[in-house]
Each structure stands twice: as C-alpha cells, then as structure tokens.
Amino acid sequence: MASQSGEHLLRAAQMAEADRITIASGVPGHELMARAGSGVAAAARRMAAPGARILVICGTGNNGGDGYVAARLLQAEGRDVAVMAPLGPATTADAGRAAADWAHGRGAAVAIDADVAGYDLVIDALFGAGLNRPLDGAALDLARRLNASGRPVLAVDVPSGLNADSGQAMAASVRAAATVTFAARKPGQLLLPGRLLCGDVTCVDIGIAPETIARVAGGIFRNSPDLWQASFPAPSLEAHKYRRGHVLCGSGGPLSTGAIRLAARSALRVGAGLATVAAGLDACRAHAAHLTAIMIREAEGAGDFARLLDDARFNAVILGPAGGVGPELAARVEAAARRGRALVMDADAISSFAGAPERLAAVIAAGEGAPVVMTPHDGEFARLFGDVAGVMDVGAKYERAVAAARMTGAIVVLKGADTVIAAPDGRAAINDNAPPWLGTAGSGDVLSGLVGGLLAQGMPGFEAAAAAVWIHGAAAQAFGPGLISEDLPEQVPAVLRRLLRQGAQAGAAR
Ligand SMILES: NC(=O)C1=CN([C@@H]2O[C@H](COP(=O)(O)OP(=O)(O)OC[C@H]3O[C@@H](n4cnc5c(N)ncnc54)[C@H](OP(=O)(O)O)[C@@H]3O)[C@@H](O)[C@H]2O)[C@H](O)CC1
Ligand SMILES: [K+]
C-alpha cells in the first residue's frame, strides 16, 4: 500500500508516530513546533490586516505550543497580540518552552472570560490531534462563545473539538475560517462535517520526510488523479472499439428506462468501446426511441440476461439503476458475478441483497477476483450492512466502507458529499471535489456508468471507482449550478482532456 502513489491522509496516531520518528532521527520536537508555529503566523498575516487585534487561545499541550510560537512571532513584528490560556499553563516540555519564550517580557495572558468579540482574528490552539474526549466545561463554553461571536478563527492543526480521524465534532467544535495543518492532511479534514468546520486547509511542511509519512501511512488517501492516473486508459490508435470493452447495462421496466440510459451514455463518454442496454420488449421499444450509439438487446428475465452474458465480449455489467428491487435483479447480479464479469452494483441491485451481505459475499467470491464495485448511498448501505457487527458501528466513514469491502470482497463506494472509495485490502480514498449541485436525481446512475465504462477498459476496481468518482465531481464542477444529470456525461470529454494533458505532462516530467 505504501507504494501506492497519491496524497496520504494520516490519522492522529499516525501523525504522532511520524513526529516520534522524526524526533528520533535528530530533529528536536521544539524545532518541529517552531516550524508549525511559523506556518500559523504566516497564515495569520494573510488573514489579519496590519493593526488588527489578534487573540491566541492556547491549550496545555503541543497544539497550544504551536499557538505560543505563533504569538511570539507575530508580537515580535509589532502585531497586536493577546494570549489566553483557559486551561492553565503548558504541560509538555516543548509547549512549556514555547510558552516561556512567548512570556519573556510580554506580560500575562488575558483572562478566560475576556470578550472574544473584541478581536479581529482568533487563533485556536486549544486542542489538536491530542483531543481524546468530548469537549466539556470551560473548553466547551469557550468553543460555543467563539462560534457565537462570529469572529474569524484560524485553527491550529484542527478546530478544537473536531476529531481529526472521523471528522465528527466531539460534543462541539470550533468553526474555523481557515486551518493550518502539518505534514499531511487528516481524514477528518475531508470528511463531513469536518471539512466545513476547518474552512480552507493549508498543509505546512514542517520537515517530516515524505518517506516517513509513507512509512506510517495506513492506506487512506485523498482522491485525486495521482492515485489512479497510472492505470487510467489513455486513448491509442490500436485500441479500436472492441479493445475498449463492451458494457452490458440491465434496464428497468418500460416506465423507468432513463436511469440505465444515463449509465450507458456515461460508460461510452468515459471511453468504453461499446454499450448495450438489455431490456424487456416494452422497455426495448421505449429505449429504441432514445438510443443511437447504444445498442439494445431483448432480455425478459434473469435467464435471458444470463444467456446474453454467454457472449464473453460483454466484459463489464451495470445493474441497479431503476432495475427493480427483488430476486430477479439479484439473479442477474449472480449471473454476472459467477461469470467473472466486471460488475457495477448500484441502487436496486444493492437493495436486492438487503440484510443478506453474506449471500452477496458468496456470489462475489464465485467470480474469482473479477472486480465488483458497489455504489451505495448511506441508506442503501445501512439496508445491506445494518445488522453486521463491525461495519455500521465503527467510527469513521472510511472505516465503515473498508469493513464492508473486507466483508463482501467488493470495492465499496459509500456516496455523499464526502464519498469514500474502499477496497478489501484496506485502501480508502476520500473524495472532496463534489460541488453541492451534484446531488441531483440521476447523478448516481451517471456514476455507475462511469465506473462501468472504466472497468470495461480494464482499469482495476479500486482505481476505476476512484477515477469515476473524481471525474463525476469534476464534470459537475465544470457545468456549475443548474446541473441536471443529463448534463453530466456531456461534461466528461472536457474532464478527460484535462486528465490526459496532466498525464502527458506527468509522463514528460518522469
Ligand atoms: N507533526 C505534527 O503534527 C506536529 C504537531 N504538533 C502539534 O501537537 C498537537 C498535538 O499535541 P498533543 O500535546 O498531543 O495534544 P493537544 O495539544 O491536541 O491536546 C492537549 C491535551 O489536552 C488533553 N485533552 C484532550 N481532550 C481533551 C478534552 N476534551 N478536554 C480537556 N482536555 C483534553 C489531553 O491531555 P489529557 O492528559 O487530559 O488526556 C491532550 O494531551 C498537534 O495537533 C499539533 O498542533 C507539534 O507542535 C508540531 C509537530
Ligand atoms: K486547534
């Protein structure tokens, strides 16, 4: 996993280990703190105009230490800085040293009940990665006063009260306009509500080596082209349409045919060589009125569908968009999985296994390693895994997705504004490029098509799913507000051009 390229996200414990390794290698902790504090001061300079009144709220640990360093640097250049130490003096050696350096000749800290509304910028250095229980008492009161004051907050590492791993507020969390974090982003800064509570996140290099980060990393990544560009199918002259795969898309009934058409069109747009919609006769007639490049084959039941799959040229299958929950659809899933075809399970295909994840796992195991990608939203996920210990009851969203992937053998795309892509081997990617307007009817159908189209071109399951999620978000960003799902496939070419340009540049740089 460590060889996987991409931006590592580090949990608090992994960050502490990176700290420890770096200190053991000869970089003193107070040096790391000095660099961290300097990064905070630089961000404060950008946020606070000259003459602005700055309040630095320092906790007792090293997060507070970063705050003392920033306070000293800002005061040394003539900034109007006050320090509040609501929980008492620093308790760690490095923070104590930073506090002493700040206090030297600079007067005492302000009282805890000082009116925070009187400041132009508040630097939140109360708790960082060391938060280990919900806020309470004075800390909880102060966080609430800070949020109520409407004052712009610059958070050190993470807003105080935010769990750096899960992105959840622990009783409450400071809401920051910006956050300065160190060495690597944390999962809780991309997951919701953490992403909203952090504001703009800047990651400061404090001298922790990339190989140290890779060594402590646990397979959690920020979703970006770096993660999957190497296996992204680049168009080439000899890759004629039969070499770029053929996606078989299972349709719903005659009054619910649009969903699978969105999926099939998306599969073609992302580069699949061919796409065919399989449908009952009445639905075929409905499709015939809409389709041109996408072919149509009649398949009344699961048996007909299975017989279509006897044609090995259908190397990828999409099932679920408005497919109709029930044993019929489950039987189609089984037919595709048992034949070892790359399979995307969306919506109704997932719900057709509600409460029976073990049965789904057995079906997937029969496919002997062909990639299966499921794309549930939270509700479908809960219906499938709700009763499984160790899946719904684990802390962070990516832990739930990885547990589900491990249990079923599928790649799990747990959708949302903070979609997580997880693999049975423990890898997870958190996606943070989806704009609010992507949440529109049918966008999930488009995503299933993008996944299927990339699988048809031979991308491995995890990479195909991560690339599809990223392209889905980028296409929505390209279109802007007012988006409806029919617009999404039409934005894919511009996103592909950008990706191929980036890929060519990366190749040239190698
Ligand atoms: N490489 C890096 O990332 C660097 C990070 N730095 C900064 O260090 C902090 C982490 O510092 P740490 O001392 O581990 O912990 P905090 O400062 O976040 O927390 C201080 C202590 O507060 C106690 N605690 C925890 N939760 C609560 C709570 N809800 N209420 C009250 N008190 C709480 C806890 O101590 P206990 O003994 O009470 O358990 C914490 O230890 C990191 O975020 C960075 O800002 C380095 O400065 C530079 C390198
Ligand atoms: K903080």
Image (tube, rainbow, N blue to C red):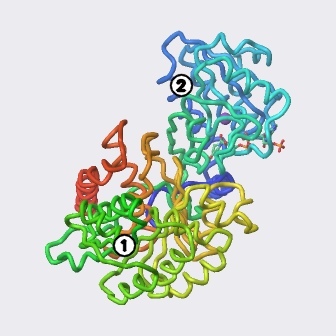
- Residue 279 - label: 1
Residue 244 is left or right of residue 345, and the answer is: left
Residue at the image point whose x is 70% and y is 25% from the top? 57
**Residue toward you, 11 or 441:** 441
Residue 201 is left or right of residue 479, and the answer is: right
Quadrant assignment for the C terminus = bottom left
**Residue toward you, 447 or 37:** 447
Q: Quadrant of ligand 2?
A: top right
Amino acid beneath label 2: Ala
Q: Residue 363 appears in which quarter of the rendering?
A: bottom right
Residue 143 is left or right of residue 258, and the answer is: right
Cα separation, mark 2 vs mark 1, equals 60 Å
Secondary element at tag 2: helix
- Measuring from the top left, give residue 448's x and y in whole percent: 42, 63
Residue holding disc 2: 44
75 up-or-down from 212: above or below: above
